[in-house]
Amino acid sequence: MLCIHLVLTLYTVHFFPPRHHELNQNRSLNLSRDLEASAMAGEDELTLLGFWGSPFVLRARLALSFKGLSYQYVEEDLKNKSELLLKSNPVHNKVPVLIHDGKPVCESSVILQYIDEVFTGTGPSLLPADPYERAIARFWAAYIDDKKWCTVCAHSFKKNDPSLLPVDPYGRAMARFWAAYIDDKLLSSFMMMSMGNTEEERAEGRKQAFAAAEILEEALKECSKGRPFFGGDSVGYVDIVLGGFVPWVRLIDRSTGSKQFDAGKTPLLAAWLEHFGSLDAAKAVMPDLERLVAISKMRKA
């Protein structure tokens, strides 16, 4: 099945032939020297190490895009990881890694919160100001997120700027909860649906995916209060966490012939999917769906 190969792309990437090792390491060393020089000069440099097909890298790119922040993007060869990546994330050696003034920040959900807290006056706030609403957002972020990634280096900048996470502690907590929910429930059900060994296992995956979507429908209703996004009138933390999966939801829809966010069962999520995907800041960084389809077919062959 096409979607089996899609899910494999989320964790093990063998799409491209390895680049020449020496060239890759020279590039890494040169970039590392440039970053160190910028940090010593006191410049505010942002560099994102990533892979185009990763939903977790897409989260970081979405946050940077919605914040309107300029950054250098470095595409990693995951079969021949650069010295810079290995040095920046020695625990897991994974992307994404955000490097700010020479300091690495790892793990997608942590990167989102870091961007929100450091660049508070730039772009929309990801987490709500109200403490309860922040708690709710964190709850749903946790529902999405499996929390298997590495930690963050603390840093402060532009303390008077607006935030992606709510200002209120409870609101921040709620945003993080739902972000974690998305990875924990939604991703696991997608994997079972796509990679189950039997039709019974795949059917159970579909059942769990639809059940998770129904719970997220209620979360969207609660968090949005009748507005378009989990963050209210503007995109917030949970929107970006879920937004990282938008291309893969569409690819699974195409491969299975069914809608993960069905307008009949989950009308708010179905509307959210179209609305989020139509935003200029989202379209600017979304991977091309046809490219994902082509890569999945290559893996199938």
Image (cartoon, grey):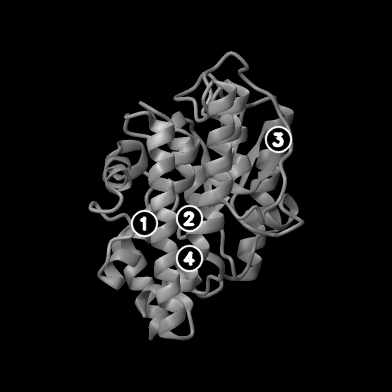
Q: Quadrant of the N terminus?
A: bottom left
Disc number for residue 74: none
Between marks 4 and 2, how big is the CA–CA gap?
Answer: 16 Å
Local crowd at mark 4 within 10 Å, few (<14), some, or many (≥20)?
many
Mark 2 near mark 3, Cβ–Cβ under 8 Å?
no
Which element type, helix, strand or loop, lies under badge 1? helix
Question: Do the residues bearing badges 3 and 1 touch, measured as CB atoms within 8 Å?
Answer: no
Question: What residue does disc 3 label?
Answer: 37
Specify the amino acid type for callout 3: Ala
Q: Residue at x 62, y 24 (%)?
A: 169
Q: Which comes sooner in the sequence, label 2 or label 3?
A: 3
Cβ atoms under marks 3 and 4 closer than 8 Å: no
Q: Which mark is drawn over residue 189?
A: 4
Identify the residue under disc 1: 247
Of badges 4 and 1, nearer the viewer stands: 4
Dividing the picture into quadrants, the one containing residue 230 is top left
- What is the spatial separation of the Cα atoms under label 1 and label 2, in whole angstroms? 8 Å
Nearer to us in this view, 54 or 49:
54
Horizontal side of residue 1 vs 105, given as left or right: left
**Distance between the alpha carbons at the discs numbered 2 and 3:** 31 Å
Question: Is 110 placed above or below 225 here?
Answer: below
Residue that label 2 marks: 55
Q: Which residue is at a point 45% across and 50% down the rendered structure image?
A: 244
- The residue mark sitting in front, 3 or 1, is 1
Report if the CB atoms under discs 1 and 2 are less than 8 Å apart. Answer: yes
Q: Residue 26 location in percent, x, y?
A: 66, 58
**Left or right: residue 201 compared with residue 18:** left
* Residue at x-position 45% and y-position 60%: 53
State which tag comes first along the sequence, 3 or 4.
3
SS class of the residue under badge 4? helix
Q: Which of disc 2 and disc 1 is earlier in sequence?
A: 2
Closer to the eye: label 3 or 4: 4
